């Protein structure tokens, strides 16, 4: 009995200490934000702006730690091995939180067990763009061209398992067409070959491909969002183009190691939501074709679950496998 009481007293003391530490967090200590992308990429740029804001609001520096590679699993493995004390957080996106669990045989982490959602930040649709030399101006013309020229079309992507790749697989499945997928090490490399005409078409995130479209280097024939984008008001959605339910949005948000104190998660959630409501944040999002999300940790968890089921079904149906 005495031993049991001693154990319980120890647990209560530990909980009290943890609560006290959470209440004091961040106490001027630096916070690391792990980003599964290279410096200069769209996720990196948006994460650095958020990091600057959080640093100002929390009174502690927030340092971005870029960990690209292995479909983001390197970054996530680093994150889940970190102490769950609020001093290491990460940027979790559609690939690391939803796609990898079905695409990779051994991702090295479990998004549900090893990580806790903090707050969704933005969603970013793709643009379906074709080479200027390809004689198609609509999605219907692209589909007809593919059917009249079986095996002729090529599609570039930013790599296997990216939303640029899986958007193409969704098109293949819904339109019942065939084309050859050419994965690149990144979207910029794929863009170069689509612009030159070596590759026929590609899907890519709006911020990444918008300049090429606006500069008439690529022809945008559809967007993968549910509604048209203000920045490309004349470009129809895939659904308007005749493919019901076709919607693809890359998304991201802040996550933390499982076991991170709830008060820390709630504080981060409040600050991130405040950042997302800033007029400057919302204006920038509209200009680059993204949509501000925000909301509770629970809402982010529901998004992750829904997207995991959606992409898991497509990956299994298309029999996409990566080592």
Image (cartoon, grey):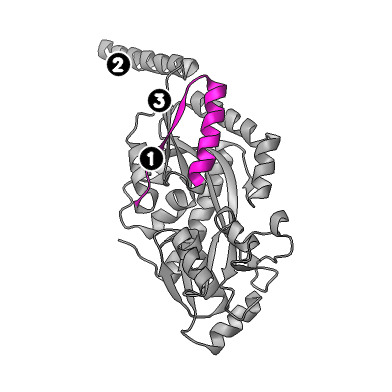
Q: Is residue 250 magenta?
A: no
Q: Earlier in the sequence, mark 2 or mark 3?
A: 2
Of circles 1 and 3, the one toward us is 3
Of circles 2 and 3, the one toward us is 3
Q: Nearer the viewer, residue 294 or 40?
A: 40
Mark 1 crowd level (few <14, some 14–19, many ≥20, 10 Å Cα) = some
Q: Nearer the viewer, residue 238 or 156?
A: 156
Q: Earlier in the sequence, mark 2 or mark 1?
A: 2
Task: Inspect this view and state whether residue 314 appears.
Answer: no
Residue under pointer 1: 114
Q: Earlier in the sequence, mark 1 or mark 3?
A: 3
- Residue 295 to residue 195: above or below: above
Q: Residue furthest bottom?
A: 148
Q: Nearer the viewer, residue 184 or 22?
A: 184
Q: Specify start and end residues of the magenta stretch as a single range.
A: 43-69
Disc marking residue 271: none
Q: Position of residue 320 (x, y in %)?
A: 39, 67
Q: Position of residue 255 (x, y in %)?
A: 47, 38
Is residue 307 rendered to the left or right of residue 224?
left
Disc marking residue 85: 3
Q: Circle 3 sits in a helix, a strand or a loop, which is it?
A: loop
Q: Position of residue 144 (x, y in %)?
A: 60, 84
Q: Which quadrant would the N terminus be assigned to in this image? A: top left
């Amino acid at each position: 009995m005495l031993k049991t009481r001693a154990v319980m007293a120890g647990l209560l003391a530990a909980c009290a200490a943890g609560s006290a530490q959470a209440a004091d967090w961040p106490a001027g200590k630096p916070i690391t934000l792990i980003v599964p992308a290279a410096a200069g990429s769209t996720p990196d740029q948006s994460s650095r702006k958020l990091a600057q804001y959080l640093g100002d609001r929390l009174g502690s520096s927030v340092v971005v730690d870029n960990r690209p590679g292995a479909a983001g699993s390197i970054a996530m493995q680093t994150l889940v091995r970190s102490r769950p004390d609020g001093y290491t957080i990460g940027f979790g996106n559609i690939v690391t939180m939803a796609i990898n669990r079905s695409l990779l045989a051994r991702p090295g982490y479990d998004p549900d067990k090893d990580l806790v959602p903090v707050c969704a930040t933005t969603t970013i649709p793709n643009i379906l763009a074709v080479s200027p030399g390809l004689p198609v101006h609509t999605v219907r013309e692209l589909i007809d061209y593919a059917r009249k020229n079986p095996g002729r079309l090529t599609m570039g992507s930013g790599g296997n398992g990216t939303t640029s790749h899986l958007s193409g697989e969704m098109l293949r499945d819904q339109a019942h067409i065939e084309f050859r997928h050419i994965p690149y090490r990144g979207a910029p490399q794929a863009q170069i070959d689509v612009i030159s005409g070596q590759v026929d078409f590609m899907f890519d995130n709006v911020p990444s491909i918008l300049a090429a479209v606006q500069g008439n280097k690529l022809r945008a024939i559809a967007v993968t969002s549910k509604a048209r984008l203000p920045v490309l008001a004349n470009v129809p959605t895939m659904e308007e183009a005749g493919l019901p339910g076709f919607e693809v949005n890359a998304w991201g948000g802040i996550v933390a190691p499982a076991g991170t104190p709830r008060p820390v998660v709630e504080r981060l959630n409040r600050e991130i939501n405040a950042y997302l409501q800033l007029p400057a944040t919302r204006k920038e999002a509209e200009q680059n074709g993204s949509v501000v999300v925000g909301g509770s940790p629970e809402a982010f968890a529901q998004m992750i679950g829904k997207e995991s089921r959606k992409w898991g079904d497509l990956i299994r149906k298309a029999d996409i496998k990566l080592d």
